[in-house]
Image (tube, rainbow, N blue to C red):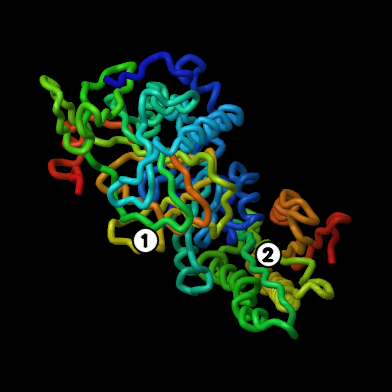
């Protein structure tokens, strides 16, 4: 049965919505996109279908336009069935997915030589940083995008995977070996996704920012995500550091 | 009779002058509740802390005789020094009730709770209890529980001719004040739960005891909550309840939902 879309806004499936970038993205762009905020235990900080802002001195005025509320889904994306459920729920609720922003990430930095933490957490770091974005995109392709080439192109559908400059260069002495390798894997996977998704009109790009909010502002990262989402590029890696943005 | 009316600072200055944050969060899960940080403007809040410290430092005010709670407490009373008397003003009562679209009777009970570091957690409960007051409620005034005239829990009185009034808790408020800065792992949160037999270690929501913040909720058969214990620091809070008519509760949820005092 076809689902009647509830919004004309682009439907954005955002992973890592409870993190620093995810929270900032929701705050800035809830009016512009219909955001489906996928998060773990820590929820988003904006209005959701279950949470809204009120003025205690005028509580009858329930505040924000409900159309600007993000749709929050709590899911453990390390489990394949939860990815499938998330995509099904999004499609059942909004009828389509126009944009995937994979802001999910995990950063555990430690020495290869002097710490067991690194090897103990390496599997999960690769899962979170590289394989979850791959599986989320593959699930959306499987459930919705693969047979909708014309509509995909008309709606400029795309994936933006948030990587890191740590996936572009070796940064010595910081314990970023596994983190950097997992982000490098994400970069390469993204370029392959761009190649394989092109026939049905879906673009895939990577944003590789330096540390935020320490080196670059979180808001600048969110804006760069939207630039890639609104543009026409595919198969590209956009680096963002203190000197600005540039293609790799 | 403890009758708090129109002379409190909150009434004269207006809550709009002392409330700093006008963007409170109303959340539906695990049951409807309201969260807010930076509730009062800084000067008012600091004056509250000073007044609270004065009460607390006079050890006679706090009593360690709270059944089921590993805490010591001080009952809300008419003589609260300003600006703490905001909490026993009618505008504050009406604000709390308004959050949940209800009109209270004007009856208020509560007190300040002091938990030592490492205090034991409580049990999961819903606050849907009855309280007894020496006077009927009424528009424009707050009537405080007055154990000198009738017991809050059972309505017993030795005052000839007094006919205590029964009311049911309507809105529960926990306002945290005078606490040191809180970080994840510091403990001492208030846990909100979906069910009464949930694991105390895994609340659906854990509200940290951040100074000048609050959590409020309507007392319903399902407003399950508990102090989670394990605080690294002392944990100070004001806890208070507005009330509503028993008939209102019975009409909404039927008979037998009010939890008797143990």
Percent across and percent down for residue B177 are 51, 39
- Relative to B151, B182 lies left or right: right
Q: Secondary structure at mark 2?
A: strand
- Relative to A195, B205 lies left or right: left
| Camera sees residue A168 | yes
Q: Residues within 10 Å of mark 2 (few under 14, many from 20)?
A: many
Tell me what residue is drawn at x 84 percent, y 67 percent. A248
Q: Quadrant of the N terminus of chain B?
A: top left
Mark 1 → mark 2, Cα distance in angstroms: 38 Å
Which residue was labeled with disc 1?
B200
| Camera sees residue B248 | no
Tell me what residue is drawn at x 33 percent, y 50 percent. B69
- Can you tell which mark lies on residue A161? 2
Q: Secondary structure at mark 1?
A: loop
- Chain ID at mark 2: A
Percent across and percent down for residue B172 are 35, 39
For the residue pair A57 and A193, the one nearer the viewer reads as A57
Tell me what residue is drawn at x 27 percent, y 28 percent. B146
For the residue pair B65 and B86, the one nearer the viewer reads as B65
Mark 1 or mark 2, which is nearer to you?
1
Tell me what residue is drawn at x 45 percent, y 39 percent. B175
């Amino acid at each position: 049965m076809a689902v009647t879309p509830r919004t004309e806004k682009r439907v954005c499936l955002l992973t890592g919505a409870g993190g620093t970038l995810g929270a900032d993205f929701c705050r800035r762009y809830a009016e512009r996109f219909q955001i489906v905020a996928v998060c773990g235990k820590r929820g988003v900080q904006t209005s959701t279908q279950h949470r809204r802002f009120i003025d205690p001195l005028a509580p009858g005025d329930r505040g924000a336009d409900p159309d600007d509320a993000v749709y929050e889904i709590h899911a453990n994306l390390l489990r394949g069935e939860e990815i499938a459920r998330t995509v099904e729920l999004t499609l059942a609720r909004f009828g389509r997915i126009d944009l995937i922003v994979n802001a999910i990430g995990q950063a555990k930095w430690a020495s290869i030589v002097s710490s067991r933490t690194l090897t103990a957490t390496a599997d999960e770091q690769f899962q979170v940083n590289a394989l979850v974005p791959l599986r989320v995109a593959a699930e959306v392709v499987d459930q919705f995008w693969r047979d909708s080439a014309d509509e995909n192109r008309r709606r400029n559908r795309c994936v933006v995977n948030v990587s890191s400059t740590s996936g572009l260069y070796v940064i010595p002495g910081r314990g970023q070996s596994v983190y950097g390798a997992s982000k490098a894997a994400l970069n390469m996977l993204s370029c392959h996704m761009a190649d394989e998704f092109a026939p049905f009109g879906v673009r895939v790009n990577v944003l590789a920012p330096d540390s935020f909010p320490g080196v670059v502002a979180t808001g600048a990262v969110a804006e760069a995500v939207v630039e890639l989402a609104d543009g026409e590029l595919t198969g590209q890696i956009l680096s963002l550091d203190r000197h600005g943005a540039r293609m790799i | 009779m403890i009758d708090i009316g129109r002379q409190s600072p909150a009434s004269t200055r207006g809550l709009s002058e002392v409330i700093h944050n006008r963007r409170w969060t109303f959340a539906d899960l695990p049951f409807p509740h309201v969260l807010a940080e930076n509730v009062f403007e800084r000067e008012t809040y600091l004056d509250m802390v000073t007044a609270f410290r004065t009460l607390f430092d006079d050890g006679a005010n706090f009593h360690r005789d709270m059944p089921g709670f590993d805490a010591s407490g001080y009952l809300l009373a008419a003589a609260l020094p300003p600006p703490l008397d905001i909490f026993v003003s009618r505008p504050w009562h009406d604000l709390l009730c308004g959050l949940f679209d209800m009109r209270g009777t004007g009856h208020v009970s509560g007190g300040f709770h002091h938990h030592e570091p490492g205090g034991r957690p409580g049990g999961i409960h819903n606050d849907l209890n009855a309280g007894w007051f020496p006077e009927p409620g009424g528009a424009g005034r707050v009537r405080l529980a007055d154990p000198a005239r009738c017991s809050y829990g059972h309505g017993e009185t030795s005052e000839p001719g007094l006919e205590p009034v029964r009311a049911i808790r309507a809105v529960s408020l926990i306002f945290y004040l005078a606490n040191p800065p809180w970080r994840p792992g510091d403990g001492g949160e208030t846990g909100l739960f979906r069910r009464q037999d949930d694991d105390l270690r895994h609340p659906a929501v854990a509200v940290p005891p951040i100074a000048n913040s609050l959590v409020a909720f309507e007392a319903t058969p399902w407003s399950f909550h508990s102090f989670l214990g394990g605080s690294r620091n002392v944990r100070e809070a004001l806890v208070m309840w507005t009330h509503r008519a028993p008939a209102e509760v019975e009409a909404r949820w039927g008979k037998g939902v009010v939890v008797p005092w143990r």
